[in-house]
Amino acid sequence: MSPKRALRQSIREKRDLLDEQERQRCALSIKDRLFSLPEFKNAKSILFFASFGSEVPTFQMMEEALGMGKKVILPITDVEKKRLLLRKVTDLKSLKASKYGIPEPSTENTAHYEPGLIDLVIVPGIVFDLCGHRIGYGGGYYDRFLSMIDPSVPRISIAFELQIVEKIPSEDHDLPVDKVVTEKRVIDACEARG
């Protein structure tokens, strides 16, 4: 097993062991830290991800963002073309599980959204390091998406502290995020990269 795959598996197992009460408590701290960042405050349209499994829960964050008048955008994974299609979501109850089990918007009751109009991307992942490198689920969807949008658009990941390691083996096509928000801190990855 490659070092990257081993790291993905071990951190995922640790994350799966978090009990529900602890997960919710941490999620609240993460949300408070994220919502207080200038990148979040200034963003009018935010590409979120709909959490599933043991990920940091995002549904309350999205509900609150909608309540603040922000546009919530969610991706649909286009498996054939290996890309993310963006949809503007106004009702989170309308999401349906994709073939991967990830809640996704349906095309019937959501509108297409242009990637160039996004002000902030919340990037999912399993493992993160202090320089903002990440290990995702292995499909490369977000790396491809991030390479197509303006580099000035902030990219922020949310994670439990247990998902942070000092250094991840990274490759040229891996695109780091600018900040990682955990229940304990905001990691300024841009600063760490120098």
Image: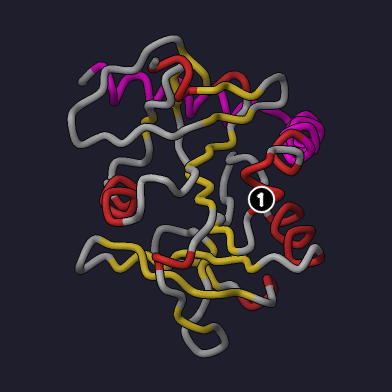
Disc 1 marks a residue whose amino acid type is Thr
Q: How is the image coloured?
A: secondary structure
Per the image, label 1 sits on a secondary structure element best described as: loop
User: Which residue is farthest bottom?
Assistant: 108
Residue pictured at 37% horizontal, 19% vertical: 7
Q: Quadrant of residue 73?
A: bottom right
Q: Residue 76: within the magenta?
A: no
Residue 51 percent location from the top left of the image: 58, 51
Above/below status of 193 relative to 142 = above
Magenta stretch, residue numbers: 3-32
Closest to the observer, 82 or 120: 120
Question: What residue is rendered at 47% in x and 32% in y?
Answer: 178
Q: Quadrant of residue 81?
A: bottom left
Q: What percent of the width, then of the height, locates residue 70?
A: 69, 65
Taking the image as shown, residue 135 lies to the left or right of residue 23, namely left
The relative height of residue 41 versus residue 133 in the rendered view (above or below) is: below
- Image position, residue 122 (x, y; %): 53, 47
Which secondary structure dominates the residues rendered in magenta?
helix
Query: Label 1 crowding class (10 Å Cα cut-off): few <14, some 14-19, many 20+?
Result: some
How many marks the image carries: the answer is 1
**Where does the N terminus fall, quadrant-wise?**
top left
Question: Which residue in the structure is indicated by mark 1?
Answer: 58
